Amino acid sequence: MSTVSVRIPTILRTYTGGEAEVKAEGDTLRAVVADLEANHTGIAARVLDDNGKIRRFVNVYVGDEDVRFADGLDTATPAGAQISIIPAVAGG
């Protein structure tokens, strides 16, 4: 199983005890999110919608790749990968 680093946006750091970056385990993004939830209860509900899909206003990157243009939650997360969770910013 791969160990990856997950960058946590400020708005979600209440779930990680204020940590800006945490380690997680998983060979796919789906497994990484499940591991995050196991260790930081409540975080998955902020990233995934009621159907278990990535929320519309949340962007997730594995390295520099936007998972929406890869395999979504089935995107591979190789050992040492940097995963970034980035909430979309509303504005106009």
Image (tube, rainbow, N blue to C red):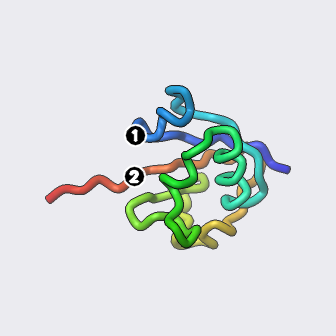
Residue 65 point in image, percent of width and height: 55, 61
Label 2, on which residue?
A: 87
Q: Residue furthest left?
A: 92
The answer to whether mark 1 and mark 2 are in CB contact below 8 A is yes
Identify the image quadrant of the C terminus.
Answer: bottom left
Q: Which mark is residue 48?
A: none
Choose mark 1 or mark 2, whichever is in front: 1
Residue 61, located in which quarter of the rendered image?
Answer: bottom right
Q: Mark 1 and mark 2: span between their CA atoms?
A: 8 Å
Residue nearest the viewer, comparing 52 with 60: 52
Residue 79 point in image, percent of width and height: 77, 47
Judge the density around disc 2: few (<14), some (14-19), many (≥20) Cα neighbours within 10 Å.
some
Label 1, on which residue?
A: 11
Q: Amino acid at mark 2?
A: Pro
* Residue beneath the point at 52% across and 65% down: 54
Residue nearest the viewer, comparing 78 with 90: 90
Residue 74, located in which quarter of the rendered image?
Answer: bottom right
